[in-house]
Image (cartoon, helix red, strand yellow):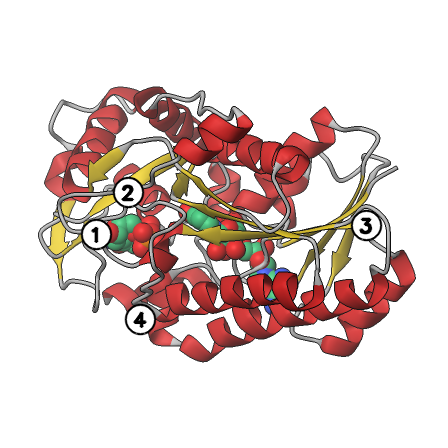
Amino acid sequence: MKKILITGGAGFIGSNLIRHFISKYPDYELFNLDKLTYAGNLENLHDVENKPNYHFIKGDITDREFINDLFSKYKFDFVIHLAAESHVDRSILNPLEFIMTNIVGTVNLLNSARHIWKQGDHLFYHVSTDEVYGSLGAEGKFTEETAYDPRSPYSASKASSDHIVRAYFHTYNLPVVISNCSNNYGPFHFPEKLIPLAINNIKKMQPVPVYGKGENIRDWLYVEDHAKAIDVIFHKGKIGETYNIGSDNEWKNIDLIRLLCKIMDTKLGRVPGTSETLITFVTDRPGHDLRYAIDPSKLRNELGWNPEQSFESGLEKTVDWYLENEVWLNHVTSGEYLKYYEIQYGR
Ligand code: NAD
Ligand code: TYD
């Protein structure tokens, strides 16, 4: 039985990944290590929590002794590392948290893995972002050879962790693999990120904040397609390699929000055009990267992965999910969220 430690499994991508692995690989034993920050939520995992091959461990990856003890106790064979502080705007408000979790936390996991993995079949899979490559102009796409040029405290902390993971491969022969993925969307996405924030605000007839003129471009991937890509890379990726994950799906923020407004008008039975009146242009994010675009041909050609979800139907599915999961949405948008929202957007 493969013993896999998944860090950050109570977050958006982690919970979708655990659901995917549990249903596809009932013979793997999964350990979900998560600190349960504001972004970690056990309600994301209700449907798997009683499975015999799923275990939850509450803990902080920045706690070196705790991580060492955990590896000694459970002797994990594989690690899929997703735990991170993940929101760019929060990294602008509080960079140190990002340095601690994303860099120091990653080093703690690498050290523990290195000390217990003397021989046998092992892998440290580091889940990262395309934001490490910086900002594109109108042309070109990020390939695995694009030089790192991170611009936000978030992307700089992820870039740093990627470099350290590679350093452990070259220096200590630790078996590692890294993937850098474009922006995800889908169920269980915390409503601080653009798509779920807009869905929540449109639902409540509240202003939808669009930074600057809404001209920035992101390349969106449905979260289950990301989980399937991680599955393929985990099983077939070459040790020491990096794979970019994306689905050639670039959208200007304002066009994406307009499409979302149209979908929401239909779903909520509103007069067409009602939700668009909520669009509110607000002060731009400092250092706002203009454009991200991923060239996923290495992953497609070498490992045979292809995204399955089209964007419009993926967005519709996502909207349906948020409308059907009002209790979840109300829980995550109370308390700490309101304080954050006030600091980030004003009243
Ligand atoms: P998320 O913010 O939804 O979840 C992060 C999870 O990590 C939470 O459950 C949180 O409780 C946990 N965590 C945070 N600090 C921790 C700590 N110190 N110890 C243990 N657990 C801790 O993030 P996400 O969107 O699911 O992203 C997961 C990973 O994927 C991150 O590494 C992120 O950089 C990467 N990624 C995200 C995207 C995206 O679009 N969301 C795209 C590419 C890559
Ligand atoms: P976000 O979802 O925060 O992801 P990232 O910054 O990691 O790409 O933002 C996606 C895009 O939407 C980005 O260009 C910033 C913009 N944005 C807004 O215009 N308004 C908002 O309230 C948020 C959160 C993001």
Asked which secondary structure carries label 4, the reply is helix
| Badge number at residue 343 | 4
Q: Nearer the viewer, mark 4 or mark 2?
A: 2
Name the residue rendered at 25%, 32% in the picture: 260
Name the image quarter holding the C terminus. bottom left
Q: Which residue is mark 3?
A: 77
Cα–Cα span, label 3 and label 2:
34 Å
Name the residue rendered at 55%, 76% in the picture: 100
Question: Which quadrant holds residue 88?
Answer: bottom left
Q: Nearer the viewer, mark 3 or mark 4?
A: 3
Are discs 2 and 1 less than 8 Å apart at CB? yes
- Residue 183 or residue 146, whichever sits in front: 146
Q: Earlier in the sequence, mark 2 or mark 1?
A: 1
| Horizontal and vertical percent position of residue 321 | 46, 29
**Amino acid type of the residue tagged 2 in the rendering:** Ala
Cα–Cα span, label 2 and label 1:
8 Å
**Amino acid type of the residue tagged 1 in the rendering:** Leu
Are discs 3 and 2 less than 8 Å apart at CB? no
Mark 3, Cα crowd under 10 Å, few <14 / some 14-19 / many 20+, is some
Q: Is mark 3 within 8 Å of ligand 1?
A: no
Instruction: Check the image and report above or below for 118 versus 77.
Output: below
- Residue 307 or residue 162, whichever sits in front: 162
**Amino acid type of the residue tagged 3 in the rendering:** Asp
